[in-house]
Amino acid sequence: MKKRVISALIMMIVLIPILLKGGFIFNATIYLIALLGLKEFLDIKQTKKKLPPFIVFISFIMMTLFMLINVNNDSIIYTIDFRIIAGLFIAYLLPVVMFHDRSKYSVNDAFYLIGGIFFLGTSFHSFMLLRNAGLEATIYLLLIAICTDTYAYLTGSLVGKHKLLEEISPKKTWEGMLGGTIFGTLIASYYFYLVINPNMNVFTIISISLFLSILGQFGDLVFSSIKRYFKAKDFSNLIPGHGGVLDRCDSLIFIALGFMFFITII
């Protein structure tokens, strides 16, 4: 626990000024985090099957392309160049024929990488768009993720008895999920009403926050199921006491994606 708290404090000291500053330094940081997340995604895959070095190299190139799409756009609307999507399929499916050896590279590997690059690239790039559009919405999403995770942990530790999905995440409980959802929703909704838009209907604000809080917790479970499939405790040991980038960003990734449903009404 001590190691976990110290790591969290160091991350806050480093990342909060970058978040407040925004601009190039924020985008560069998110780009670096995205590459680290991609490395973890590839590494956990390679615990079962080694990928060809050429495919690994292509993966970092494709992630870079995703992250650079409209990087300086100050609109919160996400757009994508279909040429990159076409390139994504071509880059990973053609080698299936070139290698013609399932033990080295197969169509299953190709679609794992296509899905992973598209998912992670879209998610991390959305963080850039959110921050470029304004600091307030970014803080709102961070509040949902952090408060939900913190209070789920505290509530689960104090009164948690009924396991949520033990085969995926043994420590999570229904009580923890409920506590995290309640506090994450209320705290984030209060911030939204106070800072972002006090004229919006309170019920709408709470409904959006509630949806995102629950979505974030299920996002956490999605990443946990990936780890269980590969029989790994964490995606990496990059952050002492916390695991890797994907262990820390799991719920936030889904919250950011879910927020895209509501950008036209906020």
Image (tube, rainbow, N blue to C red):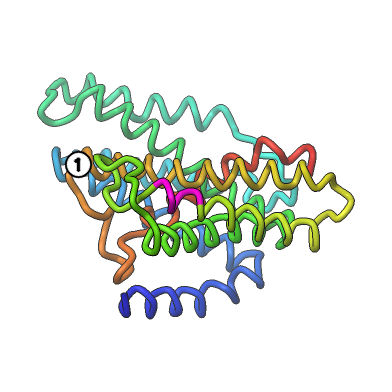
Membership of 177 in magenta stretch: yes
Membership of 148 in magenta stretch: no
Name the kind of residue labelled 1 in the image: Phe
- Asked whether, in this view, residue 219 is left or right of residue 146, the answer is left
Asked which quadrant contains residue 137, the reply is bottom right
From the image, which quarter does the N terminus lie in?
bottom left
- Asked whether, in this view, residue 110 is left or right of residue 102, the answer is right
Q: Foreground residue, 101 or 136?
A: 136
Check the image and report above or below for 249 versus 229: below
- Name the residue tied to disc 1: 230
Chief SS of the magenta region: helix
For the point 65% across and 39% down, the residue is: 260
For the point 55% across and 50% down, the residue is: 181
Q: Is residue 58 visible?
A: yes
Which portion, as a residue range, is magenta?
174-178
For the point 65% across and 62% down, the residue is: 139
Check the image and report above or below for 110 versus 210: above
- Measured from the top left, where is residue 44 in percent x and y? 23, 46
- Measured from the top left, where is residue 28 in percent x and y? 53, 62
Q: Foreground residue, 217 or 253?
A: 217
